[in-house]
Amino acid sequence: MAIEAFDVVDLIHSKRDRGVLSTAQISWLVDAYTRGYVADEQMAAMAMAIFLNGMERREIRDLTLAMIASGETMNFSGLPKKTTDKHSTGGVGDKITLPLAPLVACFGVAVPQLSGRGLGHTGGTLDKLESIPGWQANISGERMRQILDDVGAVVCAAGSGLAPADGKLYALRDITGTVESIPLIASSIMSKKIAEGTSALVLDVKFGSGAFLKDIAQSRELAQTMVALGEDAGVATSALLTNMNVPLGLAIGNANEVRESVEVLAGGGPSDIIALTVALAREMLRHAGQPDADVEAALTDGRAMDCWNRMIRAQGGDPSAALPVARETHVVTAPRDGVLVEQLALPFGIAAWRLGAGRARKQDPVQHAAGIDLHAKPGDRVTAGQPLFTLSADEPERFARALEALEGAYRIGEAGDEVLTGGPLIAERIGA
Ligand code: URA
């Protein structure tokens, strides 16, 4: 049996006692965990020690590089287009990838978007797209390259070969209360994005009630850490800090989020979705050398829609097919006249999840037609009896638990009351 370079218990003691791990120690730890030599319970102890005591920038970089080295990497340098990707830290009603990828691709830029499935109250891009009849998330690397060359945008499942150490560690963090740690989130996201081989990356880092990190100062630190990791790895990286106190747009779910995205691609849709899509597209196109691209025009003149149709067809989907509709609906109305002054993202995300739009365990299926359609946003005047939102589910038994989650999640005040949105939609930009 090969002699191991370190004793994992020594490394756990060191981090537990606020020590700093060396490059060699981190590289060995990640490799030994991927091989199965370091056990899950030992890595869970290490994750908790990192959660409690943090890591220095150099340690975070080493952890990221070690997770990249645990698997294969992709390379699009032979593609006759610039590559730019976007990553969101996740939120409620966050369907921005859907209009964004074809919008950027219609300017001749390749968008290789390796996405995930939803877990907990935040939705997953693949779950949303799978509500389109025929659409396939799993495609080969070769097919991905062909679509990037031809259409420009691909949204597909990341193969298990990309940063497998992160796959294992993320699943462990999920069940050991160690997700909300800046060093662990930053290394997890950036290991996958750097391994994916994009030459530029725009991060949408959320703050607020529906985000991983509620506090803007923490989100800022996460964004700064990720931007530095990207730049160190030669990926041009910038970040927008965006508000996740209120659900994004009017649709929360899967099929209904696709419907809303198509409205945006047809030149309509809710103003917050348009604003965020346009801001992120500008940022991505700036990295691709097109700072003056007329992004709004491409949404209204059909160019982005044309690219969407080709992108969906390239992965077996029928963009004109009817999307699934839930068997049951339940409408919640305004109890009185007034102004909607509060609408909290997190409870709406939890309610959509309880309706069947999300999953509690990785292996569970999602119900594509389940979700919530909002009929009013904070600041809107409402009258007694007016629909505030509609819940949709295949099983009516789900409504009671969803409604329980929504108790206290919205408030109707008087005209002139402060509307609580937690600040502007786009708070800050970070990076060069
Ligand atoms: N998304 C990831 O990929 N990793 C995290 O740690 C958190 C969000």
Image (cartoon, helix red, strand yellow):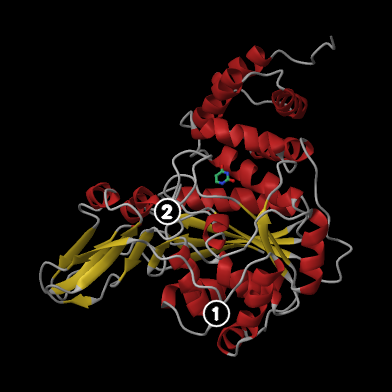
> In what quadrant does ligand 1 lie?
top right
Q: Position of residue 250 (x, y in %)?
A: 37, 69
The answer to which image quadrant residue 29 occupies is top right
Name the residue type under label 1: Leu
Q: Count of labels shown?
A: 2
Label 1, label 2: how many angstroms apart (C-alpha)? 23 Å
**Label 1 vs 2, first from the N-terminus:** 1
Residue at point 61%, 63% (across, down): 134
- Report the residue marked by disc 2: 357
- Report the residue marked by disc 1: 265
The answer to which image quadrant residue 198 occupies is bottom right
Quadrant where the N terminus is found in the figure: top right
Q: Position of residue 203 (x, y in %)?
A: 60, 59
Q: Is residue 13 above or below residue 52?
A: above
Q: Is residue 292 above or below residue 343?
A: below
Decide if residue 30 is in sight here: yes
Question: Within 8 Å of ligand 1, the CB of disc 2?
Answer: no
- Disc 2 secondary structure class: helix
- Front position among marks 1 and 2: 2
User: Left or right: where does residue 27 sit relative to residue 325?
Assistant: right
Residue 419 is labelled as none
